[in-house]
Image (tube, helix red, strand yellow):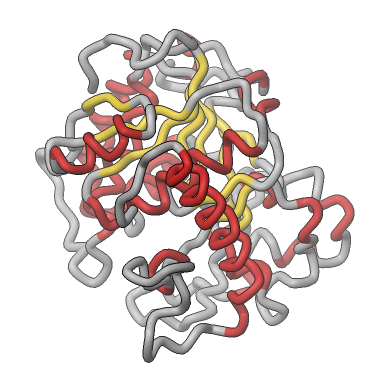
Amino acid sequence: MSDGKRAVDSDKVWTTLITNLDYLPGLLTLDASLKNAKSAYPLVALYTDSFPEEGKKILAARSIPHQRVAYLLPTKSHRDYSADPRFYDCWSKLTPFGLTQYKRVVQLDSDMLVRRNMDELMELELDDPEVAAQDPAPPTSRRVFAAGHACVCNPLGKKHYPSDWVPANCAFTAQHSDPAKAQKEGADPDPALPNQPMGVELINGGLQVVVPSKPLFDRIVAYMDENAADLDFADQSLLSNLFRGRWVALPYTYNALKTLRWPSVHGAIWQDDEVKNVHYILTPNPWDELDRTKPGQPLKEGLTQDTRNVTSHGWWADVHRARKAAELAAGIDDEW
């Protein structure tokens, strides 16, 4: 939890978690992209004690609001994420559910790029928090939070991913026959179906639309403490399991995983002009490919770029370079 104070005057905010300097270039460019899209709402960087003072000074120099939050970890049940250590940080992405000083929080991963205004998420209808926190859940509670689906195609063939992560079980595969509908509606499965693959009901935690509530947050933390050992993908597994059938499935356009654009994955539904927010999942991140020590930030020497990512990574690089030019004009001249 935070100290209960607001980092900004607005009661509706975008937030992004930052625990180290590795994702700082992403955060700075995410902030620039929200401003380019003329969002009416500020981005607040939620930093943990592991984020160094240097990082806070970099945020302050750019007038990016930031506030400390506790680093969340389960206390009773634990899971080994050594094959994918980033998931240890992901528990803290549940923090927005407890930021009750705000009326609405939309959590964004720092490896995102906003391409079109999506302020409508601040007005999206969600359950009253008192109803959402009830256990057992009332039958009327079907909108605890909103998020996009995870892609369970496993296009890189990661061996530690579940064996049922295959295209046939992916929510996006079910939308291939109607790409026009996929731009406007999420593939919202019916969890009551007995043979419904679990992959279809799995969220991606990169974007979460939340109405903060202490009872709801307390319930989430209690579930994390007791069940972490059984949760393959940390926060997103927790939310998918605890609120199965009770979340709003957003269209892919709000959390457009970069791999969806690959023709062999979900190129059938991806439309560049419809995408509002790109999510640069999986390494390399766009900033990993840039040599920040050289003018213009060209591709790092010796690095071979995946041709499937050239266009989408180019979108990020364009905003990054424009941000750097504006900062230099304002007297901010550093490697970030």
Quadrant for residue 177, please give it.
bottom right
Q: Say which of 335 and 70 sits in front.
A: 335
Say if 316 sits above or below 136 in the image.
below
Q: In this view, does 146 lie to the left or right of 49?
A: right
Question: Quarter of the image containing the N terminus?
Answer: top left
Q: Which residue is drawn at 36% across and 25% down?
A: 65
Question: x and y percent of residue 242 in the render?
Answer: 41, 37
Q: Residue at x 31, y 24 (%)?
A: 219
Question: x and y percent of residue 199 in the render?
Answer: 54, 60
Quadrant for residue 63, please give it.
top left
Question: x and y percent of residue 148 in the render?
Answer: 59, 46
Q: Which residue is drawn at 46% across and 35% down?
A: 107
Q: Say which of 90 and 80 sits in front.
A: 90
Say if 196 sits above or below 277 in the image.
below
The answer to whether one can see residue 203 in this image is: no
Question: x and y percent of residue 311 in the render?
Answer: 66, 71
Q: Say which of 259 and 22 sits in front.
A: 22
